[in-house]
Image (cartoon, grey):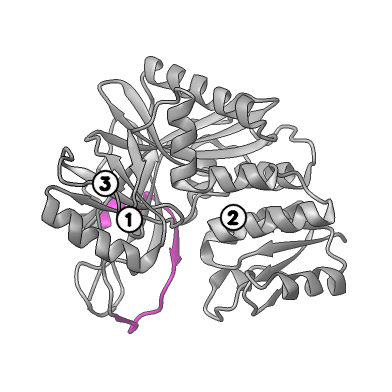
Amino acid sequence: MKKLLILGGSHRDIPLINAAKKLGYYVITLGNKDYYLGHKFSNKYYLINFNNLNEVKEIIKNENIDYLLPGSGEESYLNTVKLSQELNIGNYDDLEIAKLVHNKWKFKKFCLENNISTPNGFYYTEKIDLENLSFPIVVKPTNLSGGRGIDIVNNYNELTNSLLTAKKLSDDIFLEEFIDGKLIAYSVFIKNKKLIYSFSGADDTYLNPYLITTAYPIKLDETVEKKLIQDIETISKILNLVDGMFHLQVIIKENIPYIIDVTRRIPGDLYPDLIEYSNGINYSKAVVKAYIGDKITDELNIKKNEFIIRHVIMANKNGIYKGLYIDNSIKNNIINIFNLIEEDTIIKDYLNTQIAIIFIKFSFDNVNMRLNSVVYAKV
C-alpha cells in the first residue's frame, strides 16, 4: 500500500483524508494540535508542526512516503509545493507561482496588470498619503486566510485604528476598493488551462461579517459566468497553472464579477462535501488525483443537481455550550451533522468559535433560509 502524507490534520482536511483512503492509500497526517479531528480519520498521525520542514523530511524518509498533499491552509500548501519539488514528486505549480497565487497583494497586482476583473487596490507603506482616500475601503493582510485581519472602514480615524490592529497580525497589508455586492465562491477544475468543471455557491455570514458560515449552490447569470471563465483561463495560461482545482471568492455587482481571493488548496469547513452532496461528483478524489499527478476519469461527472446548505453553527454569545437546538421542521432534511466541540465546552470567543457543521437538503422551490432560527447552539 502506497503512503500519502498530508500536511494537516484538522477537521478541514477530513474530505482529503477520506478520499485518499478510498483511493487505496495509507494516509498519515501532521499537526501539532492534539485536538485536530482529522487525525482520528487517518491511518497514522504525528503531532508535529508541519512548518518544521526538517522534521517533515525525516518523516518522509522514515515512512517511505510516496506522495504529499496540502491541508486546507496557505502555509500547508506552500510547504507541500516546496517539498514536492525538492523531492520531485506530485503535480504542483512552480513554487514562485504558488507564492504569487497565495499572496493576496501579489495576486491582486497580477490581476490589475493583466486586466483580470478585481477591485482596485494598493500596497500599504507608512510613506503613503492616506488623507484623500475614498471611503469605504477594505484593509487586508496579504498572507492570512479565513477573514483574519480584514476590516471595512468608513473614515480616516477608523482606517488608522484598523491599520494598527492589522499590523499586529501581519507585516504586509494592502488597501482595497470596497465593492458592495453579492459574495460567492466559484470552485473549478482546470485541465490544459481550460475549465472543465465549476461549482458556484453563495457565501453568507452570521455575526462575524468576515467569517463564512453558510454556503449553498446558486446559478450564475450567463454573462457573469462567461467573464469568470474567461478570467480563469487567462490566469491559467499566463501563470501556466497545472491541472487541478482552483477555488475563488468573487464579489458580483451589476453583473460584473470581481475576483477578491483565490487558492489552490481545498476550501475549508467541509466545503468539498457540499459540492459532492449537491452534484454527486467525487470532488475530493479528483483533488487527490490531480495533486499526485494521476489521471482524473469520471470523478467530475455531474450526477445530480440538488439544493444543499452547508451551515457552520456558531453561538450568539460567550458561555457554556449546552448542545444544539434543531427545529422539528427541518429534522428530516438533515443529511449530516459534524460536531466540532463537545457539550459543556466554555466558549470564550463566540465570533470565531465553530460548534458544528450541518448539511441540510431542501427542494429548490421550498427553501427555508432562516437557519439561525431553526438550528442554533444553546449557550
Camera-nearest residue between 129 and 103: 129
Q: Which mark is residue 211?
A: 1
Q: What whole-number distance in Å separates the C-alpha atoms at marks 1 and 3?
A: 15 Å
| Residue 90: percent from left, percent from top | 78, 48
- What is the magenta range? 328-347
Element carrying mark 3: strand
Q: CA distance from mark 2 to mark 1?
A: 20 Å
In the displayed structure, 371 sits above or below 38; it is above
Q: Is residue 355 above or below residue 82?
A: below
The local secondary structure at tag 1 comes to loop
Choose top left, top right, bottom left or bottom right for residue 218: top left
Question: In the image, residue 254 lies at what x, y percent?
Answer: 25, 21
Is residue 77 rendered to the left or right of residue 163?
Answer: right
Residue 78 % position (x, y) = 62, 55
Reading the image, the residue beneath label 3 is 138
Q: Is residue 176 magenta?
A: no
Q: Which is nearer the eye, 56 or 299?
A: 56
Q: Quadrant of the C terminus?
A: bottom left
Provide the residue designation for mark 2.
15
Confirm whether the magenta stretch covers residue 346.
yes
Q: Residues within 10 Å of mark 1 (few under 14, many from 20)?
A: some
* Residue 24 visible to the viewer: no
**CB atoms of marks 2 and 1 within 8 Å:** no
